Image: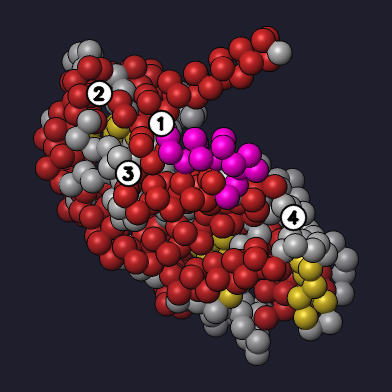
């Protein structure tokens, strides 16, 4: 028993050390991450975390295959309602547990839909249009990612039949909308996939729809908003511009735990309603069994937070990103993007660092100084391994209360680290002490009280639960 206890203590000690480092000493600038609120986390560890609630539509009604799920069934419907409100859309599928799975579910559904329409089993998409991986396209929309097995081979090349969006000659981060329109008319893809992982500008959805909408059969227009899901509306409104499907992960700019979502307006009577039915079927039983009910419950809290605070949060994120980019430039760093646009129109800021080492080397140097970001291949790099860029995002630190002036000082610390190789680790840790309280959620006193009550209900040993809850309340200042 002593050895067992010591092993558990060892892991717990490392967990505490990592938490203290990431949450109290570091500036977290990875654009694909965020810290969920206390209430989201408490819901994640509650009873549904160990349960199942498989269900599907059969003969016009929703059939559940487990008992004891009335609560989580209602939670799922409430979460759908909250996400419909957020997107302003008609349909939401919540059972995907990552953004990549959300994309794959849509790809599976389209191939199933095409096969049924053609009467040919297992027919793949004839052609897909997407963002080039080397120009910032997301891995999940590539043949080596979630698109694998769902697109035909090009008979001339033997490779997957994928055509990339053309980019502007003077700005590789923007799609050339005019050339794209001509390519859509010429190639007539089955699917057009917008969305990136290196993401600083809106995508030309309206321009694509203006051409694709007149084709027969018309391409499905999909927007993978994983990185900018939490900026829906303030940054771009794809459904209003002609997108058929929006996918994404719920834990980057959105406030949620790590899950995926698929949204559409394919309500009853829509000409693509059958595609939505296939999407639901590919979510379950096609891709999931248990869809992680603890994080589903956490997503509901996150959706309520987002719907309540999104106007202020989104505005602050976008202004902080521009201020951060400007400050980095003023401190001597080379910032990607057009200065006329403030270098970025999302939460992301891209820095070219080749003069000071590879992206990987510079990212490690920043991490050693308590600034966490990730290295990134820029459009003119030969490979990701020999990257010359650093990709940053302001969303998480915005939620911890940083405003434009705060990013000025952070930019100076980054420049000291990157350009002058200065050791600013302790100064960074001291500066982070100003930004420890999470915003855009319940205040600490309310959240800790509710969280403590959830924990008391979770643990079956009452004395243990009371001690745990008391410690939580004390730690939160309650």
Q: Nearer the viewer, residue 468 or 398?
A: 468
Name the residue tied to disc 3: 478
Can you tell which mark lies on residue 374?
Answer: 1
Q: CA distance from mark 4 to mark 2?
A: 42 Å
Residue 371 percent coordinates (x, y) = 31, 27
Query: Would residue 112 be seen by someone viewing this image from the given angle?
Result: no
Of circles 1 and 2, the one toward us is 2
User: What residue is disc 2 on?
Assistant: 429
Q: Which residue is mark 4?
A: 52
The range drawn in magenta is: 457-471
Report the Cα–Cα distance between label 3 and label 4: 34 Å
Q: Secondary structure at mark 1?
A: strand
Q: Nearer the viewer, residue 377 or 77?
A: 77
Secondary structure beneath label 3 = loop
Which is more N-terminal, label 3 or label 2? 2
Q: Please tell me which residue is depicted at 55% across the width and 71% down the height of the picture.
A: 78
State which tag comes first along the sequence, 1 or 2: 1
Disc 2 from disc 3: Cα separation: 25 Å
Q: Residues within 10 Å of mark 1 (few under 14, many from 20)?
A: many
Percent position of residue 38, x then y: 42, 46
- Among numbered discs 4 and 2, the one appearing first in the sequence: 4
The answer to whether 267 is drawn above or below residue 47 in the figure is below
Tell whether position 319 is magenta: no
Along the horizontal axis of the image, is 131 left or right of 427?
right
State the quadrant of the C terminus: top left
Q: Nearer the viewer, mark 4 or mark 2?
A: 4
Residue 45 visible (yes or no): yes
Question: Mark 2 against mark 3, which lies toward the viewer?
Answer: 3
Secondary structure type for disc 2: helix
Q: Which is in the foreground here, disc 3 or disc 4?
A: 3
Disc 1 versus disc 4: nearer the observer: 4
Image position, residue 244 (x, y; %):
55, 73
């Amino acid at each position: 028993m002593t050895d067992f206890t010591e092993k558990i203590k060892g892991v717990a000690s490392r967990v505490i050390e990592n938490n203290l480092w990431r949450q109290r000493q570091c500036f977290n600038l990875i654009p694909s991450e965020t810290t969920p609120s206390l209430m989201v986390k408490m819901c994640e560890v509650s009873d549904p975390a160990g349960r199942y609630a498989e269900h599907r539509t059969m003969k016009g009604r929703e059939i559940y295959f487990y008992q004891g799920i009335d609560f989580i069934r209602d939670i799922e419907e409430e979460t759908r309602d909250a996400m419909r409100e957020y997107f302003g859309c008609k349909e939401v599928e919540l059972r995907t547990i990552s953004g990549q799975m959300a994309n794959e579910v849509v790809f599976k559904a389209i191939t199933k839909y095409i096969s049924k329409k053609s009467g040919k089993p297992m027919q793949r998409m004839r052609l897909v249009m997407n963002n080039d991986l080397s120009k910032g396209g997301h891995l999940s929309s590539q043949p080596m990612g979630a698109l694998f097995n769902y697109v035909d081979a090009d008979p001339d090349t033997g490779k997957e039949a994928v055509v990339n969006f053309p980019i502007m000659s003077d700005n590789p981060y923007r799609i050339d909308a005019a050339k794209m329109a001509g390519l859509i008319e010429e190639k007539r893809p089955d699917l057009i996939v917008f969305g990136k992982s290196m993401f600083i500008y809106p995508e030309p959805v309206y321009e694509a729809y203006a051409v694709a909408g007149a084709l027969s059969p018309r391409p499905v227009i999909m927007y993978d908003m994983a990185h900018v899901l939490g900026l829906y509306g303030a940054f771009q409104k794809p459904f209003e511009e002609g997108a058929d499907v929006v996918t994404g992960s719920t834990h980057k700019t959105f406030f949620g735990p790590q899950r995926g979502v698929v949204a559409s307006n394919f309500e009853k009577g829509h000409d693509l309603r059958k595609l939505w039915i296939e999407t639901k079927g590919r979510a379950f039983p096609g891709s999931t069994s248990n869809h992680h009910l603890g994080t589903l419950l956490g997503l509901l809290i996150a959706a309520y937070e987002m719907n309540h605070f999104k106007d202020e949060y989104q505005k602050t994120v976008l202004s902080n990103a521009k201020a951060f980019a400007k400050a980095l430039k003023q401190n001597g760093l080379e910032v990607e993007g057009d200065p006329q646009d403030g270098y970025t129109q999302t939460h992301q800021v891209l820095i070219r660092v080749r003069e000071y080492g590879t992206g990987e080397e510079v990212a490690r140097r920043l991490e050693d100084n308590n600034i966490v970001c990730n290295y990134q291949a820029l459009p003119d790099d030969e490979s990701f391994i020999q990257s010359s860029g650093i990709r940053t995002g302001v969303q998480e630190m915005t939620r911890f209360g940083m405003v434009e002036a705060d990013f000025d000082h952070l930019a100076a610390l980054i420049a000291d680290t990157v350009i002058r190789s200065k050791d600013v680790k302790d100064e960074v840790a001291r500066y982070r002490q100003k930004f420890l309280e999470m915003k855009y959620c319940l205040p600490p006193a309310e959240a800790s009280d509710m969280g403590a009550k959830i924990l008391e209900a979770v643990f079956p040993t009452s004395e243990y639960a009371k001690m745990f809850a008391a410690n939580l309340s004390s730690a939160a200042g309650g």
